[in-house]
Image (tube, rainbow, N blue to C red):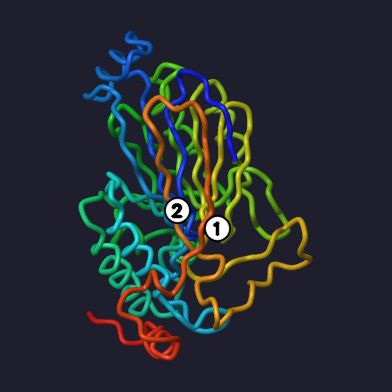
Amino acid sequence: MATGFDRRSFLRVAGTSLSIGALYSAFAPLAHGGDQMLARTLGELNGERPSPFSFVQLSDTHVGFDGPPDPLGTKAFEAAVGAINRLRRRPDLVIVTGDLTHDADSTDEHAKRYKLFKRIAGRIHAAQIKVVPGENDAALDGGAMFREFMGPAHYSFDHRGVHFIALDNVSTGRPAVGAEQLAWMKADLARFPLSAPIIVFTHRPLFDLKPQWEWFTSDGDQVMNLLAPYENVTVLYGHIHREHFRRQGSARMYAARSLIFAFPDPAAAGSRKPLPFDRAQPFKNLGLRIVSGKRGARDLRIEDVELTTSEYSGTVGMGQMLKHGRADAIEE
């Protein structure tokens, strides 16, 4: 798939989707002979001028999930970490768009799941880990445990001339961002010129993808209205456990697939029943979108490649994967 970009576009997506997430390369054309006034402005605002970098999007690891339709627990997540560490060009950031853990009735059990998530994610070499909560992480306690283990549920930061905004659309116990966070976002955006590169990441889609399946954010249109004036906006989300792309105005929106199980195509399925586990292809519909591009390229290319058992080093056959797939022995 190829999509043209104008000369001010910053994000280049070109690489491999292994359905666990996505690796994006941000090629800032301003760093290579583009609009030098904007480059200087962004350098003053962010403390550094735009320069190329790459980052990975993972989503819906559901650490602690145990049972059908996926008996493998964290194995796809671990395979994703291994795939990232084998990349020739190491990403600067790894962004996880929610549902890091699967919810639990016991707070002690949920805490163990957060610890296991952090232990697996901690094996990723060099990259900074940036996360937002999903409803499994935060809906039951208003995000208290997420903040205890992972830090703020919404925040912003700048990286190599690009502004990132992490939005929480789950902690209220319903699919909403809320008035307080919207006011914060409006103030956060106000300091940037309209041509600045903005990357927003959140858990639920910010549009009505499938409301009857809870694939929406009730005030997502207000978020998109705040972003509408900006020329270079990318929105990353998860929750739907499948790859998806949507363009709305100048904004491009990408969903990363899950690392636990996949949901069906909402346009073709009558119910949100997870796709069944395939013993012959245990990572089917799971993977990682690895995105890279050539400096100065004007096109967006996404190549989709699924994970296979060969991506999980140290596994000897399906029996071993099933035997060790469950996360029922979690270290303190």
Image height of 198 relative to 258, above or below:
above
Q: Position of residue 147 (x, y in %)?
A: 33, 57
The residue drawn where x is 67% and y is 64% is: 264
**251 with respect to 54 (left or right):** right
**193 with respect to 314 (left or right):** right
Please name whichever residue, 33 or 38, is drawn nearer the observer in this view of the structure.
Answer: 33
Q: Are marks 2 and 1 in contact (CB under 8 Å)?
A: yes
Q: Residues within 10 Å of mark 2 (few under 14, many from 20)?
A: many
- First in residue order: circle 2 vs circle 1: 2
**Residue type indicated by callout 2:** Thr
**Residue type indicated by callout 1:** His
Q: Position of residue 117 (x, y in %)?
A: 33, 68
Image height of 227 relative to 55, above or below:
above
Q: CA distance from mark 2 to mark 1?
A: 8 Å
Quadrant including the N terminus: top right
The residue drawn where x is 51% and y is 65% is: 286
The residue drawn where x is 49% and y is 26% is: 298
Q: Position of residue 13 (x, y in %)?
A: 47, 39
Which quarter of the picture shows residue 191? top left
Image height of 5 relative to 121, above or below:
above
Please name whichever residue, 291 or 146, is drawn nearer the observer in this view of the structure.
Answer: 291
Q: Which residue is mark 2?
A: 97
Please name whichever residue, 58 or 284, is drawn nearer the observer in this view of the structure.
Answer: 284
In what element is the residue under mark 2?
A: strand
- Residue 281's label in the rendered image is none
**29 with respect to 180 (left or right):** left
Q: Which residue is mark 1?
A: 239
Q: Position of residue 152 (x, y in %)?
A: 33, 50
In what element is the residue under mark 1?
A: loop
Q: Residues within 10 Å of mark 1 (few under 14, many from 20)?
A: many
Quadrant including the C terminus: bottom left
